Image: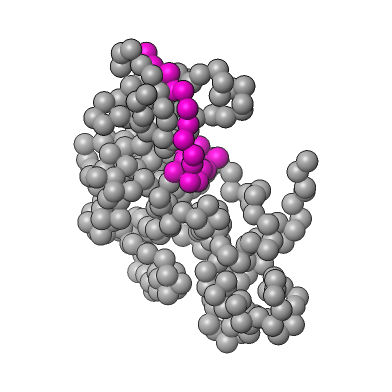
Amino acid sequence: MPEGKIIKALSGFYYVLDGKDTIQCRGRGVFRKNKVTPLVGDYVVYQAENPTDGYVLEINDRKNELVRPPIANVDQAVLVFSAVEPDFSTALLDRFLVLIEDKEIDPVICISKMDLVPDEKQAELEEYVRDYTAIGYPVLVTSSVTSDGIEKLKPYLQDKISVFAGQSGVGKSSLLNAINPDLELKTNDISSHLGRGKHTTRHVELIHIGTGLVADTPGFSSLEFMDIEAERLSYCFPDIYETGENCKFRGCLHDKEPKCAVKEAVEAGEIRPYRYKHYMQFLEEIKERKPRY
């Protein structure tokens, strides 16, 4: 039976890429029975008598999956955060990083709209770039208006399935248009009334960018840590996890435990205070989470 990859899901149809051909398919009823939904990014077995009348028969094992946005088998996440409009937020960035790290997806931090940064904010943003680079994250500063940083971003997208993620209004679609103007993805400015971006992407679709596939998504509609346990949270903060290996007690949560290497590193300036602050906020959020039955 032929196999392919789902590159778009829309109105009950799954568009399966097999070589250079795209076949429009429906899902078999067995998926509904087993409460399994085919996702964009899935490798599937299908049958089709013609390009517009196929059926997805099987879904191969996934290496990872995201729920909101619904996509599977992602290699990396390009986390797009605008320098301004909306303002750059380390708290929100760290929340995205935790969600991505938990799924063992490689993150790339992309700061957009650098052409709009006022002089008084330049030094602050440059410091954040140094901080996250020191942790080990790739950090790119870009502008879809001036094309600064666009050429540096392109190599990251080759031969991989990438998801562009970030709050609405940060310029994800504008960046993709700057990378490939032929895409002509719809964009919208920030809503002056709400102070945030208006959603322009309505469904998940994988788009060819060079030798890679990029998902332009409606964005993360849930940023809660529903599946992350307190003991795992430090794994999602590489700087804290590495330092935590030197804690006196195994299983240290870097909270109230004595002789905690992480707290000592924060006091010594080796871990940025805002990173530890966010870690503690997230830890408290996880501890207060209602159990699911």
Q: Position of residue 64 (x, y in %)?
A: 50, 46
Q: How many numbered markers are drawn?
A: 0
Examine the rendered structure and indicate whether residue 55 appears above or below residue 78.
above
Quadrant of the rendered structure where residue 141 is?
A: bottom left
Could you tell me residue 271's position as x and y percent? Answer: 54, 78
121 lies left or right of 234: left
Vertical side of 82 occupied by 124: above or below: below
Q: Quadrant of the N terminus?
A: top left
Colouring rule applied to residues: one colour
The answer to whether residue 169 of the structure is visible from this angle is: no
Give above or below for 93 relative to 210: below
The quadrant of the rendering that contains the C terminus is: top right
Q: Taking 53 as reference, is 68 above or below it?
A: below
Q: Nearer the viewer, residue 267 or 55?
A: 55
Question: Residue drawn 70% across and 71% down?
Answer: 251
Residue appearing at x 33%, y 12% in the figure: 49
On whether residue 242 falls in the magenta region, the answer is: no
Residue that protrudes farthest toward the bottom in the picture: 268
The structure residue drawn at horizontal position 50% and vertical position 55%, both measured from the top left corner, is: 104
Q: Position of residue 99 (x, y in %)?
A: 55, 53
**Camera-nearest residue between 202 and 115:** 202
Residue 61 drawn at (x, y percent): 49, 39
Outermost residue on the front side: it is 1
Would you say 204 lies left or right of 272 here? left
Out of 235 and 84, give the one closest to the viewer. Answer: 235
Please tell me whether residue 57 belongs to the stretch shown in magenta: yes
**Is residue 140 shown to the viewer in this render?**
yes
Q: Which residues are magenta?
A: 53-73
Which residue appears at 36% of the width and 16% of the height?
A: 48
Q: Is residue 8 left or right of residue 145?
A: right
